[in-house]
């Protein structure tokens, strides 16, 4: 009857291999992939999703089935070897079964499953569902015992994720880029989309110092010349002082007015064709501002602070650029705000946004406390640095190249090895020369 015993041992090893492969595949299967396949009509994907929703019972069924198969195979093999070699057969059975279980019932099936978890998960989904149904009463008893023990040791409680769903999605995108399955441009685009809820209008607006505005009291001929000289189609109009914005002039409306006046620009009154200004608070989330642009069917808004003072302007293009990167057309003025140097350093205009610099250089400078590179240096230095001063923080050395009054207009940024940054940060003893 040894052949029957051998047959049962082999069957037990095959069952153990099935459970081992199922455990690796089902725990490593992508829920997102299963949801996508389910929407495409794959019934097995529905089964996998149902099993993953019952993860605790699934793990119990896998471990219970695997251990029953392994223990059964080992017991039968021990009996066979003992009948052949006597008491020393226990040692032989232990050695042989350890090798067979590790290689053929653990490592081999799990290696196969880990290389194609989604495919294996779809293949084993229905057999595992049947197994859970058969072992259902026993699994319920095991679950009750486990929960009582967890409550006894104070381990009961819901699963607490370390990262939010958005951060987990961002991590998945970074991983795909690291593995070469995502281009940098695609990663930046998805990252920008995920950042919209975290950004405020003040993070993407054009500051008032860089705004193009026109005095509404200028003679019509001069005002028309200034409008035609600029590359923008929407221009804020001010009266008495630049902070007093009375409207927004659209170039198309101005051209229609010129045509209506038969080319006589002296007859044009821009205050009658200017659109009323739309003011939005600087602390509004960018995602809400995007919805507001779509709802009002306009692309231009003026940004004000908590005191109602104009801080800048924001356009639909500014928000879209946070997702897709810089958008340039034939009328844009190209400003070289980031210039790489042969020595590996980068010369940056102080007004360059930190997010744009990170995207261009694939850096990770923090942008929580400041919007521009100059603002980051001032925040870290706790002062307005003079020309020639250098600072080292966040793994980079910042050297001020130009300063105009209270503004830092140009900096040189050089990556610094971590060891050098730590050495530079060490306090030096008084009286010691270096």
Image (cartoon, rainbow, N blue to C red):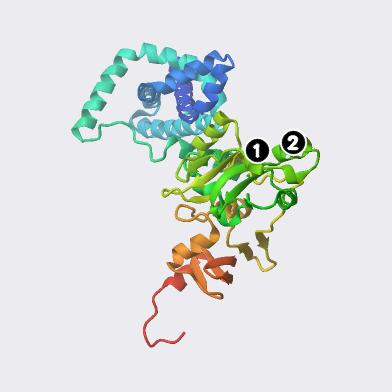
Tell me what residue is drawn at x 49 percent, y 26 percent.
31
Q: Secondary structure at mark 1?
A: helix
Residue lying furthest front: 267
Label 1, residues with CA under 10 Å away: few <14, some 14-19, many ≥20: some
Asked if 343 appears above or below 113 in the picture, the reply is below
Residue lying furthest right: 262
Q: CA distance from mark 2 to mark 1?
A: 10 Å
Tell me what residue is drawn at x 26 percent, y 27 percent.
146
Residue 124 x %, y %: 50, 19
- Residue 294 picture quarter: top right
- For the residue pair 233 and 133, the one nearer the viewer reads as 233
From this viewpoint, is residue 294 visible?
yes
Tell me what residue is drawn at x 56 percent, y 30 percent.
296
Query: Would you say the residues marked 2 and 1 are in contact, meaning their CB atoms lie under 8 Å apart?
Result: yes
In the picture provided, is 238 more to the left or to the right than 330? left
Residue 202 x %, y %: 50, 48
From this viewpoint, is residue 416 visible?
no
Tell me what residue is drawn at x 58 percent, y 50 percent.
238
Residue annotated with mark 1: 273
In the picture provided, is 141 more to the left or to the right than 417? left
In the picture provided, is 336 more to the left or to the right than 34? right
In the picture, the disc for residue 252 is none
Disc with the residue nearer the chain's start (2 vs 1): 2
- For the residue pair 93 and 354, the one nearer the viewer reads as 354
Figure label count? 2
Residue 188 x %, y %: 60, 44
Asked if 137 appears above or below 121 in the picture, the reply is above
Asked if 11 appears above or below 109 in the picture, the reply is above
- For the residue pair 242 and 43, the one nearer the viewer reads as 242
Residue annotated with mark 2: 256
Asked if 125 appears above or below 407 in the picture, the reply is above
- Residue 185 picture quarter: top right
């Amino acid at each position: 009857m040894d052949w029957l015993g051998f047959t049962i041992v082999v069957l037990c090893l095959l069952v153990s291999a099935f459970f081992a492969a199922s455990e690796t595949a089902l725990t490593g299967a992508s829920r997102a992939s299963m949801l996508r396949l389910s929407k495409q009509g794959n019934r097995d994907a529905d089964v996998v999703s149902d099993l993953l929703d019952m993860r605790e019972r699934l793990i119990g069924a896998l471990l219970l089935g695997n251990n029953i198969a392994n223990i059964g195979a080992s017991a039968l093999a021990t009996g066979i070897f003992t009948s052949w070699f006597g008491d020393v057969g226990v040692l032989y059975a232990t050695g042989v079964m350890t090798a067979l279980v590790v290689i053929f019932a653990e490592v081999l099936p799990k290696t196969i499953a880990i290389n194609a978890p989604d495919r294996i998960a779809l293949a084993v989904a229905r057999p595992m569902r049947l197994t859970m149904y058969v072992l259902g009463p026993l699994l319920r008893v095991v679950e009750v015992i486990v929960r009582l023990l967890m409550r006894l040791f104070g381990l009961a409680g819901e699963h607490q994720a370390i990262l939010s769903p958005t951060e987990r999605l961002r991590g998945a995108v970074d991983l795909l880029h690291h593995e070469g399955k995502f281009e940098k441009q695609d990663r930046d685009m998805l990252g920008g989309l995920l950042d919209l809820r975290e950004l405020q209008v003040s993070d993407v607006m054009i500051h008032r110092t860089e705004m193009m505005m026109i005095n509404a009291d200028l003679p019509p001929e001069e005002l028309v010349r200034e409008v035609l000289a600029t590359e923008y189609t929407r221009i804020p109009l001010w009266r008495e002082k630049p902070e007093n914005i009375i409207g927004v002039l659209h170039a198309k409306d101005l051209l229609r007015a010129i045509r209506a006046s038969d080319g006589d620009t002296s007859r044009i009154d821009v205050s009658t064709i200017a659109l009323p200004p739309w003011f939005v608070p600087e602390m509004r989330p960018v995602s809400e501002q995007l919805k507001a642009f779509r709802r009002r069917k306009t692309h231009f808004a003026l940004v004000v602070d908590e005191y109602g003072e104009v801080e800048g302007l924001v356009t639909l293009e500014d928000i879209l650029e946070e997702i897709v990167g810089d958008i340039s057309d034939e009328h844009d003025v190209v400003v070289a705000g980031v210039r790489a140097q042969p020595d590996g350093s980068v010369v940056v205009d102080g007004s360059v946004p930190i997010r744009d610099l990170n995207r261009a250089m694939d850096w990770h400078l923090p942008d929580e406390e400041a919007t521009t590179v100059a603002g980051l240096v001032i925040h870290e230095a706790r002062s307005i640095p003079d020309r020639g001063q250098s600072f080292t923080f966040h793994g980079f050395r910042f050297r001020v190249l130009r300063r105009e009054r209270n503004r830092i207009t140009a900096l040189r940024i050089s990556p610094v090895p971590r060891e050098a940054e730590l050495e530079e940060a060490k306090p030096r003893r008084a009286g010691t020369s270096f």
